[in-house]
Image (cartoon, rainbow, N blue to C red):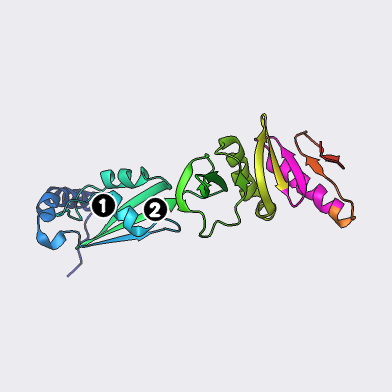
Amino acid sequence: MAERRLKPGWKILGALLLGVVLWLALPLLGGLEFFRIRQVEVRGLKNLEASTVIKALKLPSRASVFDRVGPIEQRVQAMPGIVHAEVSRRPPGTLRVTVEEAVPVALVPSSNRLKAVDATGKVLPFDATVGAEDLPLIRQPDSLVTRFLAKLQEVDATLYGRVSVGWRVQRDVVIQVDNQRYWFRPDATAEAIRAVTAVAQDLTRKGRAFAELDGRFAGYVVVRWKAA
């Protein structure tokens, strides 16, 4: 007997009907004890505690895996230190929360201790004594400085790792590397950053000590043998 195959149109219609049936059945499934949330998996954490994220979910005692995940995602994304969150279901009773934490770019003194800040200058709820000891120190939360440090971290991680202190001078950014100062515009391009790095490497290779490198000018780097 020849096998009969459904036409593409019937397959699409069947898939739509199945989707409608499942959508209508979700409230009924959600009411079953079998689908109560019994476990929450949290992925992507580096600094925050999983218990802190789970508490922020604010799940009712009889929450189901088929409850809407949109409001849950919004609550997680509203947490300090979280830039993105995605919630998915693993029936019968597991909820999976995948998060992306904000990346610390600097440390700032606060109440006799150091706190981490992100690229926007926001203070993060992370313990700065764990895994962030080598971050540059800034004098106060300042998005002009932190955005530049984030750009430097992306363009030249080696140079970024050598920065001890960063601060603002009017509308410019100054970083201290070893005993030298590097000047930049806050919107410095990758080319400007690499140009300053190249000049520093060349001078070091030649054994010529310098006090400051100024990369605020298009097309060239100013070398100052004594600090301004």
Check residue 166 for magenta coloring.
no
Span of residues in magenta: 177-203
Percent x, y of residue 53: 33, 53
Q: Residue 16: x percent and y percent? A: 20, 48
The number of numbered badges drawn on the structure is 2
> Between disc 2 and disc 1, whose residue precedes?
1
Q: Nearer the viewer, residue 13 or 89?
A: 89
Residue receiving disc 2: 99
The residue at the point 37 percent across, 55 percent down is 98
Residue at mark 2 to residue at mark 1: CA–CA distance: 39 Å
Mark 1 secondary-structure assignment: helix
Residue 162 position, x and y percent, is: 69, 54
Task: Identify which amino acid the numbered label 1 is placed on.
Answer: Pro
Residue underneath mark 1: 8
Q: Position of residue 159 (x, y in %)?
A: 70, 52
Left or right of 134, for residue 24: left
Q: Residue furthest front?
A: 112
Viewer-nearest residue: 108 or 95? 108
